[in-house]
Amino acid sequence: MRPKGFEPSAWTVLKEIKKEEIATKDGCYLRFTISPLETAFDEKISFADQRRLIYFFEKEGILNIHRTTFQSQITEALARIQNIEPDVYILDIHQPQFDQYFQKHEKLTSPLSLSKTTHRKSLIGANINFQDDVGWLTIDQTTIHLPPFLKEHQFCKAAFKHPAHVPVDWSTIFESMTGDFPEDVDDSFAITGSKRMVYDTMNLLNKRVKKETRSSDKLFAWRENTIARMYLSTTVN
């Protein structure tokens, strides 16, 4: 049962914007990239709906769209000719209006316990710890036992070497996971070859974390051939 008056897609996009705001230096514009998203009810949010929500939030007065651009190397003239919508939005966040709006929607998530399973946990503010020696990923009271020394373990070992919110090139993660530098590095955003192994491992980890913690949040994000850990951790052993 979906809670009355609650809009899951709006909350999901709002959380993504909040994550980017946390990772953005004060006084700088925020970069929001249209990417595959799902609500806590496992409903996909189309790219068109994400765009509509950005413009809706602008009308709500919590942000301004400073400009739009594209992930891929495409000219604005070509985009207009081919009717290609922008997928990167450079945003100016209005405070304290944004935080007040966020807190209002955050309160509306409490009825998620009425959803098809149980309450979905947010990873915002969670206590996250990765122990390399045993391959344990701990999120608050939940310990996820990763298969020792296999892909997920090696991915976490590589990813947790870098601060949260800092994009790391996929080839760096690959090299740390395998000990080899990928031979098929290029400037394309296509996810193929060695890149596919890293991308699939990241998605497998995100699914495992969502399942074990009953969260709708992704611990790792893929943007323009880079990977970022989206939440702060405590210690790494």
Image (cartoon, rainbow, N blue to C red):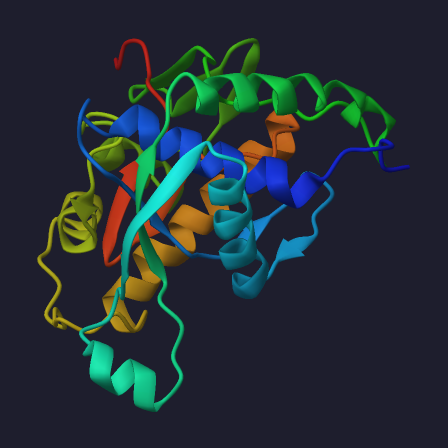
The residue positioned farthest toward the right in the image shown: 1
Tell which of 186 and 111 is nearer to you: 111
Q: How many marks?
A: 0
Tell which of 126 and 108 is nearer to you: 108
Tell which of 97 and 137 is nearer to you: 97
Q: Quadrant of residue 199?
A: bottom left
Q: Position of residue 145 (x, y in %)?
A: 50, 26
Residue 126 vertical placement versus 40 (above, below): above
Q: Quadrant of the C terminus?
A: top left
Q: Quadrant of residue 149?
A: top left
Q: Position of residue 36 (x, y in %)?
A: 50, 57
Q: Is residue 33 left or right of residue 216?
A: left
Residue at 34% x, 50% y: name it.
222
Residue at 24% x, 71% y: name it.
72
Q: Position of residue 82 (x, y in %)?
A: 36, 89
Q: Is residue 14 left or right of residue 117?
A: left
Q: Quadrant of the N terminus?
A: top right
Residue at 76% x, 33% y: name it.
6
Q: Is residue 147 left or right of residue 75?
A: right
Residue at 44% x, 10% y: name it.
127
